[in-house]
Amino acid sequence: MSGELLTVSQAADYLKVSEKTVRRLISSQKLLAAKVGDRSWRIKESDIEAYLQAHSNGKKGAESK
């Protein structure tokens, strides 16, 4: 379900970071989000995955021996 919408709190849990960190990522436009109403943000799970992919160290897992 990569089209699922997450709240800031759910995104923070998903990423194992604070809500403040998620809000900073949104403010700095590093993480895409949509504003709902005056105060609420929604983040697509696929956008979180894209953020993680863009900020990974490039390795594809443990190397085989």
Image: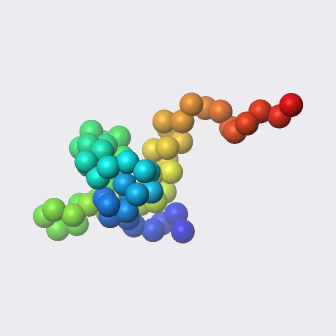
Q: Which colour scheme is used?
A: rainbow
**Location of the C terminus (image quadrant):** top right
**For the point 39% across and 67% down, which residue is it?**
5
Give the x, y percent position of residue 25: 31, 43
Is 18 displayed left or right of 48 in the figure?
left
Give the x, y percent position of residue 29: 30, 42
**For the point 68% across and 38% down, which residue is it?**
60
Q: Is residue 45 above or below residue 4?
A: above
Q: Is residue 47 above or below residue 6?
A: above
Q: Which residue lies furthest to the right in this view?
A: 65
Q: Of 21 and 44, which appears nearest the observer?
A: 21
Q: Which residue lies furthest to the left in this view?
A: 38
Is 62 displayed left or right of 6 in the figure?
right
The quarter holding residue 8 reads: bottom left
**For the point 45% across and 68% down, which residue is it?**
4
Is 6 displayed left or right of 20 in the figure?
right
Give the x, y percent position of residue 9: 32, 61
**Location of the N terminus (image quadrant):** bottom right
The quarter holding residue 43 reads: bottom left
> How many marks overall?
0
**For the point 13% across and 64% down, which residue is it?**
38
- Look at the image and tell me whether residue 30 can be seen: yes
Is 26 displayed left or right of 45 in the figure?
left
Give the x, y percent position of residue 7: 32, 64
- Look at the image and tell me whether residue 26 can be seen: no
